[in-house]
Image (cartoon, helix red, strand yellow):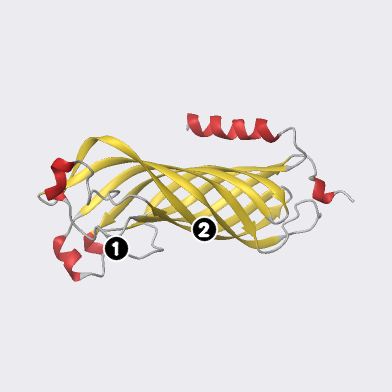
Amino acid sequence: MRYLVIIILTFISFHSSHAQINELGIFVGGSNFIGDVGATNYISPNQLAVGGLYKWNRSPRHSYRISVIFTDLKGEDIKSNDPRRQQRNYSFTNQMIEISAGMEFTFLDFNLHSGKKVSTPYLYSGITVSNMEDSFFQNGIQTAQNSSSWAFGIPMVLGFKTNILGNIILGFEVGARYTFSDNIDGSYPEDSLLQPNRFGNQNNNDWYTFTGLTLTYTFGKNPCYCIN
């Protein structure tokens, strides 16, 4: 949490000299994993996910955005629709922190200085980097390696937001993350000594999804696009 505060304050101080609108707030929702262990539903939150986000609204149609989200990813074969996974009956958990940065595009103008209630769907994408625990399966049981690693990914987020009370903006979003890792669930340990412990589809990388609400507060001077 200390690093989250530092990141947010850095962005605020960097952009405070510019005539733009800032948004600062929280994300609360759920996460679910799609990989070699557990169910394969793309939108099926089963673990709490919380975090913070900051946006710099560069224009009524796009914003730069950074977020930090914490969750414990979880997968259980018994909850899969695949009879083979149910019979295997593996399960895993992995504590993870994700840092994401990119650009948010709105379908409609989202002018926060119009004095009116404004709403719009939006898309967000960029890059993510996630820190997670390393593990592998031994005799069907997840075993920790006492180490952690970072995995890059691509977020693909669809959402809807509206200003509900003056400077307060409420949003709902569903965001899938494609990662460049195949070992979030412990199915593909990188250590060459653990090659016999690898299993699953080694041609597909892991995914995870965040589904939830954002609540942000806007502040700052009127941006240049509002000046006649």
Total labels: the figure holds: 2
Residue that mark 1 sits on: 39
In the displayed structure, 207 sits above or below 13; it is below
- Label 2 or label 1, whichever comes before in sequence order: 1
Q: Depth check: 128 or 32 in front?
A: 128
Q: Residues within 10 Å of mark 2 (few under 14, many from 20)?
A: some
Residue that mark 2 sits on: 157
Q: Is residue 186 left or right of residue 31?
A: left
Q: Is residue 194 left or right of residue 190?
A: left
Q: Residues within 10 Å of mark 1 (few under 14, many from 20)?
A: many
Q: Depth check: 130 or 54 in front?
A: 130
Q: Nearer the viewer, mark 2 or mark 1?
A: 2
Q: Is residue 1 left or right of residue 151?
A: right
Q: Which quarter of the picture shows residue 7?
A: top right
Measuring from the top left, give residue 199's x and y in whole percent: 18, 56
Measuring from the top left, give residue 185's x and y in whole percent: 27, 50
